[in-house]
Image (tube, rainbow, N blue to C red):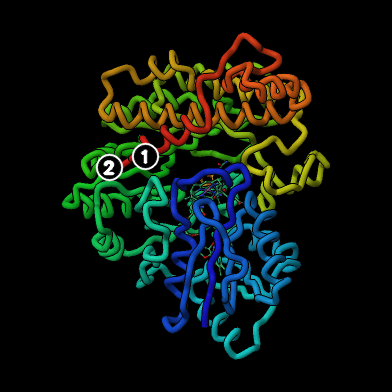
Amino acid sequence: MKLELIAPATMSNSRRRKGLIPPLALAMVAAVTPPEVEISLTDENVNTIDFHKETDLVGITVLTVTAKRAYEIADTFRARVVPVILGGIHTSVLPEEASQHADAIVIGEAEGIWPQVIEDFKANRLQRVYQQHERPSLIGLPFPRRDLFAEDAYYVKHTLSATRGCPYSCSLCTVPSFFGHSYRFRPVEEVVKEIETFKERKFIAFVDDNIVGNPKYAKELFRALIPYKIKWVAQASVTIARDDELLKLAAATGCISLFIGFESISPASLLAMGKKINVVDEYEKVIRKIHSYGIAIHGFFIFGFDEDNEDIFKRTVHFAQKMRLESAQFDFLTPYPGTAFGKYMDDTGRIITKDWSQYGYNLVFEPKQMSRETLQKAHDQSWYEFYSIPSIWRRLGLAHRHLWMFWKANLYYRAHWRTKLRSDKDRESSNLLSPLISLDSKNLIPEACLRLSPTKKERLEPFSDCTIDVMCNALHLT
Ligand code: B12
Ligand code: SF4
């Protein structure tokens, strides 16, 4: 039997030639597939899907942002009478929607249920819905089938999952709705054994939602990592700064950077999202403490809370600059289906689109204290400002521990966002640009001039798609 596993492309990502991170979810699904099944894996972010390939079954992983594309892929295979099974977070939170594009769906984690699905398929008795009622144990899990990933297709080669879920339950986050309020972890010796299977052990990105959700476990894990002398990054909650021993161990085991969800510098917004662990008055102390151990910080910030007024953007960027965060991202608040916040926005009729491909990257709801245009513009301006060369220089200077790596990462973010924002603008103003394009076809103006914004003609953008590739290639995190 042949099984094709597919990770659909993020729409805005579809032109990228190299991916950031391989799809660990599918490697895990492959690992729990009965061994006699012949599996191949296509990540559409780095490869093209072969719709004519001979296969008996297709399995697709679905996030909200990839749902639209996942359904297109599923419909195409099904039109060729190839059965399709959908799984992953979006399938699990909107099973009825997903069912319309699949022969069967799997709600929840694959472990413990997927072998049954395959058996049923082989015996021609596939059910429409599979759901397990107990969360699978993380003891004795097989290692993900990384051999199925396309070679040299990712900037970060080695990702690892040690825990699942998060002990907290913020109203806008999908993690509690998918994993429940449990926080489970794998035995440390199994995590270490998995690391030993990596060809090179220079750099690892943990994909856990919160690597320090259980400080006792995290300390045990970090101690076990010491002999391997790896460099690693992970997501962590601000609570790490309350435990010096934990921070010391993280630094000693090679933690380069922590990805921390500050979310907002407005206490009212934090209260509204139920993120009780974050205390704005402690942020400065938290950041200084983490920095004092030589660990960098990538800060996550969200714009668009009902409590936000127009000064939030400048204050947030100024705060991130003042605290010399090595990198940061400024996302729109997003009413993900399956979350308390998503339900509230839906119930109050403020969601402006259910085109899922917009979720995670664009503004999809009506803000309360400002117009959509204001929020969009200020959000874009925050990226421009934070990743302007003077800002990068002020934050990183020349005396940072991993200077070259963070400069490269900052230049990458700068190029990536400038290109995205510019292409959004270009789309909006394509009519205005048409005279320039026709001039160019006669070679009368250089290509770069096409990148002039019609509203700000004085600004010539130095970055192009080609520059992005150069930046990406430079971003060898190892
Ligand atoms: C690592 C990660 C990333 C990485 C890599 C993502 C990737 N494509 O693999 C990067 C940094 C690139 C990333 C980007 C984004 N991410 Co992200 N990411 C994660 C994170 C932290 C871990 C995912 C992971 O690898 N887990 C480990 C694997 C083993 O577990 P799993 O994915 O849950 O898979 C299991 C089950 O879901 C199920 N399953 C999954 N697929 C399938 C398929 C079949 C057929 C079956 C049977 C079962 C099955 O079985 C698997 C094994 O148990 C999750 C949080 C989370 N806990 O899920 C957020 C998360 C998935 N990301 C999220 C978001 C919003 C994004 C972005 C949109 C953010 C942004 N604005 O840029 C982008 C989208 C890019 C994209 N196309 O993926 C949200 C998704 C919400 C939603 N409703 O879809 C999450 C849940 C975070 C959150 N707190 O809400 N992300
Ligand atoms: S702490 Fe982070 S991962 Fe946990 S529920 Fe809140 S937003 Fe989600």
Residue 459 place in picture, x, y as percent: 59, 12
Crowding at label 2, few (<14), some or many (≥20) Cα neighbours within 10 Å?
many
Q: Amino acid at mark 1?
A: Ile
Q: Amino acid at mark 2?
A: Ala
User: At x 55% / y 81%, what residue is drawn?
Assistant: 118
Q: Is residue 141 above or below residue 238?
A: below
Q: Are marks 1 and 2 in contact (CB under 8 Å)?
A: yes
Given residues 417 and 457, the one toward you in this image is 457
Whether the residue under disc 2 has CB within 8 Å of ligand 2: no
Whether the residue under disc 1 has CB within 8 Å of ligand 2: no
Return the residue found at the far left.
227
Image disc number at residue 240: 1
Image disc number at residue 95: none
Residue 158 place in picture, x, y as percent: 35, 53
Given residues 278 and 435, the one toward you in this image is 435
Q: Along the polypeptide, which appears first: circle 1 or circle 2?
A: 1
Q: Which residue is mark 2?
A: 250
Q: Secondary structure at mark 2?
A: helix
Residue 358 place in picture, x, y as percent: 68, 42
Tell me how many marks there are.
2
Return the residue found at the far top.
458
Residue 433 horizontal side relative to residue 272, left or right: right
Classify residue 351 by image quadrant.
top right
User: At x 26% / y 50%, what residue is drawn?
Assistant: 222
Residue 293 horizontal side relative to residue 308, left or right: left
Return the residue found at the far bottom.
123
Measured in 3D between alpha carbons, the distance from the residue under mark 1 to the one under mark 2, in whole angstroms, is 10 Å
Residue 94 place in picture, x, y as percent: 70, 60
Crowding at label 1, few (<14), some or many (≥20) Cα neighbours within 10 Å?
many
Classify residue 71 by image quadrant.
bottom right
Q: Is residue 277 above or below residue 133?
A: above
Query: The C terminus appears in which quarter of the rendering?
Result: top left
